[in-house]
Image (cartoon, rainbow, N blue to C red):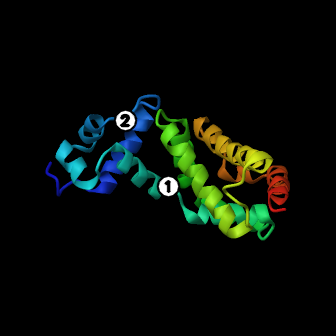
């Protein structure tokens, strides 16, 4: 297969297949191109290096609608019941984020996913993402809890329904901590 025949999306799908087959193994350019059925030149036509590719994968899975809905529920602007139709649509994105968090490349993805959510919280809730001390610790605690739930869900076979992550007691606990950060 030539460079023109394999596009970014096909390289992305090859990445997801490799993670499913070998979740603990680091994905190499050689493995990725072999799975996609192309040569290394095709990969480098689309991406500078693996870091650039990983950033592209992250852009694919970080869905602003997921974060917006999460912020709406946490802030009280949306009830979990009102958000449920949206939450069900986010199942593929949340599953893929969980898969990334469980992978051998999670060290690349976890900080970037946390930063994306923290930036959104800053914009919509007025929480300072550059906070230090106890405020930063609380923000990391909340982010870590959310990301851990998503990672846990992705490890289950089969994964529990996505709406199980929006249980009122979870939302109330997170919302209480977020309100403290808004002070």
Judge whether 183 appears above or below 13 on screen.
below
Give the residue at x 83% y 54%. Answer: 168
Q: Is residue 65 visible?
A: yes
94 lies left or right of 85: left
- Per the image, label 1 sits on a secondary structure element best described as helix
Quadrant showing the C terminus:
bottom right
User: Which residue position is annotated with label 2?
Assistant: 27
User: Dot 2, crowdedness within 10 Å: few (<14), some or many (≥20)?
Assistant: some
Residue at (73, 67) in percent of width and height: 126
Q: How many numbered circles are shown?
A: 2
Residue 61's tag is 1
Residue 152: where, in percent of width, then height?
64, 38
- Label 1 environment density (alpha carbons within 10 Å; few <14, some 14–19, many ≥20): some
Residue 79 x %, y %:
79, 66
Circle number at residue 138: none
Q: Earlier in the sequence, mark 2 or mark 1?
A: 2
| Residue 136 position within the rendered picture, expressed as x and y whole percent measured from the top left | 73, 49
User: Is residue 86 visible in the rendered structure shown here?
Assistant: no
Foreground pick, 128 / 105: 128
Judged left or right of residue 177, residue 83 is left
- Residue 54 horizontal/vertical position (percent): 41, 47
Q: Is residue 13 left or right of residue 59?
A: left
Tell me the distance, in whole angstroms, between the alpha carbons under discs 2 and 1: 17 Å
């Amino acid at each position: 297969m030539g460079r023109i025949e394999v596009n970014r999306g096909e390289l992305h799908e090859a990445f997801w297949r490799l993670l499913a087959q070998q979740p603990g193994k680091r994905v190499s350019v050689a493995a990725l191109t072999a799975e996609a059925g192309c040569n290394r030149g095709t990969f480098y036509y689309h991406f500078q290096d693996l870091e650039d590719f990983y950033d592209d994968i992250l852009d694919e899975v970080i869905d602003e609608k997921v974060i917006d809905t999460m912020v709406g529920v946490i802030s009280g602007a949306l009830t979990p019941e009102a958000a449920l139709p949206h939450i069900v649509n986010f199942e593929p994105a949340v599953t893929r984020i969980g898969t990334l968090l469980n992978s051998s490349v999670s060290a690349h993805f976890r900080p970037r996913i946390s930063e994306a959510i923290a930036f959104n919280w800053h914009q919509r809730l007025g929480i300072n993402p550059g906070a230090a001390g106890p405020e930063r610790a609380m923000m990391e605690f909340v982010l870590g809890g959310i990301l851990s739930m998503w990672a846990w869900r992705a490890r289950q076979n089969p994964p529990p329904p996505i709406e199980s992550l929006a249980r009122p007691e979870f939302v109330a606990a997170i919302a209480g901590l977020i309100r403290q950060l808004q002070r």
